[in-house]
Each structure stands twice: as C-alpha cells, then as structure tokens.
Amino acid sequence: MSDQTVPAIPEVTESDAYITRAFNAPIDVVWKFWTEPEGLAQWFGPSTTHVDPATIEVELRPGGAWNLDMVDNETGAHYPIRSTLRVVKEREYLEGEVYGETEHGDVLNVVLRVWFHDHGDKTRITLHQGPFSAEFRDMTAEGWEESFQKIDAIVAGAAA
C-alpha cells in the first residue's frame, strides 16, 4: 500500500463520468470488490458481459497493474482493460491510468479515480473517470451503474 496523499475530487467537466453511489456493505467488503480478483470477477462490467477470472491481475501499489478482460456474454469477444495504478491508499482511494478496447473503439489516457467513504455498515464511493468523448462518457457511466447493481445483488444475497 501507499502513504500517498488522497487528492481532493477534481472539477467535473462534461468529458468526465462522475458517480457517487452507496452500498449496503462495510468498507472492507466494498474495498475487496475492487481490489481482490475474486471480488472483481463477480461484478465488473455491464450486464451483457462478465469478467474472465484468468485475466485479472491486481498489484496494489503505485506502478502496479489493475487488469482484466470483459467478455461479451453473447459473442465471447474479449475487451481488455489495462490500468497502471498511480495512487493506492488502502480503504480510501484508488487511482489509475486506464487503456481499454471496446466494440466501439479504444479508450486511451483515461484516469480512473475512486474514493471510498466509510459510513459504518454502509460505504459510499465517489467515482471520477475521464476524459471521454460524450458517447464514451455516457456508455461508461451506464456500464458502471450496471456493474454497481451487480454489487447490490451480491450484497443483498449475502444478507439474505
């Protein structure tokens, strides 16, 4: 882990995806969804995709990898996402530079920032990602929302 300073949330522009979302799970659980391969494989990607667990690589350190392949459920096409982590502050913040291949084209030089806010038995995240074209921004935000619904379902199943 890193002792790096957690930055303030930058100004949100029209080229950024920006989401604040609460989960009915403690911060340790939500952090693991983002940082452990078993957790990432369960939720990452929109509803039309899944993650190939064999492609997940997480190295929680500045300069480390945060990589995975989303797989189209219908066609089996792989869409790699490769990230180099820049800042890692356990249970508080992740930042990485992301490169991705999608069916709509490549995503290059995008920064993903995720703040984790501890609210006891709930956790709120603030996600800021960009810059994107308007089309990619909207698709990205929709993909995150669908992904977060998967976390909600997993958490609800654990609580049942």
Image (spheres, grey):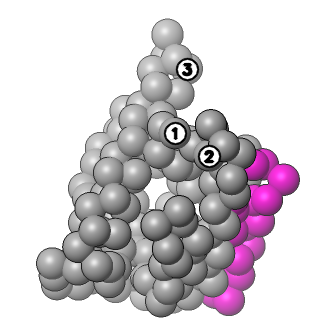
For label 2, the residue is 72
- Per the model, the C-alpha gap separating discs 3 and 2 is 26 Å
Query: Secondary structure under badge 3?
Result: helix
For label 1, the residue is 48
Q: Position of residue 15 (x, y in %)?
A: 23, 80
Q: Position of residue 91 (x, y in %)?
A: 50, 61
Q: Quadrant of the N terminus?
A: bottom right
Q: Earlier in the sequence, mark 3 or mark 2?
A: 2
Neighbour tally class for label 2: few under 14, some 14-19, many 20 plus, Cα within 10 Å: some
Query: Secondary structure under badge 2?
Result: strand
Q: Amino acid at mark 2?
A: Asp
Residue located farthest toward the top when viewing the structure as drawn: 160
Q: Where 100 falls versus 38 (above or below)?
A: below
Is disc 1 in contact with disc 3, using a CB cutoff of under 8 Å? no
Q: Position of residue 127 (x, y in %)?
A: 34, 65
Q: Amino acid at mark 1?
A: Thr
For label 3, the residue is 158
- Residue 13 located left or right of residue 149: left
Question: Is residue 22 visible in the rendered structure shown here?
Answer: yes
- Residue 38 located left or right of residue 22: right
Q: Magenta region: which residues?
A: 52-69
Q: Residue at x 48, y 37 (%)?
A: 47
Find out whether residue 160 is within the magenta segment.
no
Neighbour tally class for label 3: few under 14, some 14-19, many 20 plus, Cα within 10 Å: few
Q: Where 32 falls versus 13 (above or below)?
A: above
Q: Where 139 falls versus 99 (above or below)?
A: above
Q: Residue at x 23, y 73 (%)?
A: 134
Q: Earlier in the sequence, mark 1 or mark 3?
A: 1
Q: Nearer the viewer, residue 46 or 86?
A: 46
Q: Position of residue 137 (x, y in %)?
A: 29, 68
In front: label 1 or label 3? 1
- Quadrant assignment, res 85: bottom right
